[in-house]
Image (tube, coloured by chain):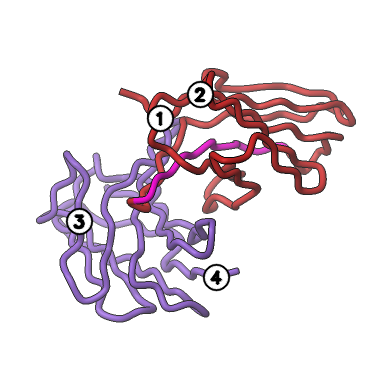
């Protein structure tokens, strides 16, 4: 049973346009959510997080939106840049400190 | 933020041998560290939670006798894959919680031949 789902295995976006990565979760006990970026053969790099008490968090080109009623969050990257090409993992956590990852979405930024 | 150093970055070993992976917190005292495994095109799966000075907590389906975890100090956790088999070939990553986020090591690519 996947508690964190990223239904799009890959996404291609033109450079300069907006990239939108989606994530759904099933466990209403999750109280914070994170996005990570990962290059091949490297560990994930933290991008941005959001607490369940918020519906939006912004950091530079990255914005995360949380819709608790729909159990859905999304990561917006604008404008998309070539260096953004990577695998993006959505993750969710609760007070027991464990975080559960989605399967990831591979983002391709097209020139 | 916290810096995590993981070593080695890659290792090839023969079936039946054991491999030790180290995870060091360079600037943060971590009472808890996490070990993940990632198979190709799969999610990062939590294997176990490493607790300083006590036994690790393993996730369901992870063999504790096969994946030995030692967290002897606040800055070092080790994962030993014992009697490795080709199906243990994977990407292993350690992590620690820092503030409101998690910091990950750079990962270890294990190939068992």
Q: For marks 1 and 2, give the CA distance.
A: 8 Å
Asked which secondary structure carries label 4, the reply is loop
Instruction: Name the residue tied to disc 1.
Output: A28
In this picture, residue A77 sits left or right of residue A105 = right
Instruction: Confirm or deny contact between disc 1 and disc 2 (CB under 8 A).
Output: yes
Where does residue A110 sit, x and y in percent of width and height? 81, 26
Instruction: Name the residue tied to disc 3.
Output: B57
- The segment highlighted magenta reads A85-95
**Residues at marks 3 and 4, common chain?**
yes
**Residues at marks 4 and 1, common chain?**
no
Q: Nearer the viewer, residue A28 or A45?
A: A28
Chain identity of mark 2: A
Chain identity of mark 1: A
Instruction: Name the residue tied to disc 4.
Output: B2
Asked which secondary structure carries label 2, the reply is loop
Q: Residue at left 42%, top 32%?
A: B42
């Amino acid at each position: 049973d996947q508690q964190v789902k990223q239904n799009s295995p890959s996404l291609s976006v033109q450079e300069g346009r907006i990239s939108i990565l989606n994530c759904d979760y099933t466990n209403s006990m999750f109280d914070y959510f994170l996005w990570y970026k990962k290059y091949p053969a490297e560990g994930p790099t933290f991008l941005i997080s959001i607490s369940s008490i918020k519906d939006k968090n912004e950091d530079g080109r990255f914005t995360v939106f949380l819709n608790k009623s729909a159990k859905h969050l999304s990561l917006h990257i604008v404008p998309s840049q070539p260096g953004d090409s990577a695998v993006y993992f959505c993750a969710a956590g609760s007070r027991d400190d464990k975080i559960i990852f989605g399967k990831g979405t591979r983002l391709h930024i097209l020139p | 933020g916290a810096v995590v150093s993981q070593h080695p970055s890659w290792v090839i070993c023969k079936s039946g041998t054991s491999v030790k992976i180290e995870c060091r917190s360079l600037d943060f005292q971590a009472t808890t560290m996490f070990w993940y495994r990632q198979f190709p095109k799969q999610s990062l799966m939590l294997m176990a939670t490493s607790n300083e000075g006590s036994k690790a907590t393993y996730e369901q389906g992870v063999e504790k006798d096969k994946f030995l975890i030692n967290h002897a100090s606040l800055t070092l956790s080790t994962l030993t894959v014992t009697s490795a088999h080709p199906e243990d070939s994977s990407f292993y990553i350690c992590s620690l919680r820092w503030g409101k986020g998690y910091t990950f090591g750079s990962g270890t690519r294990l190939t068992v031949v």
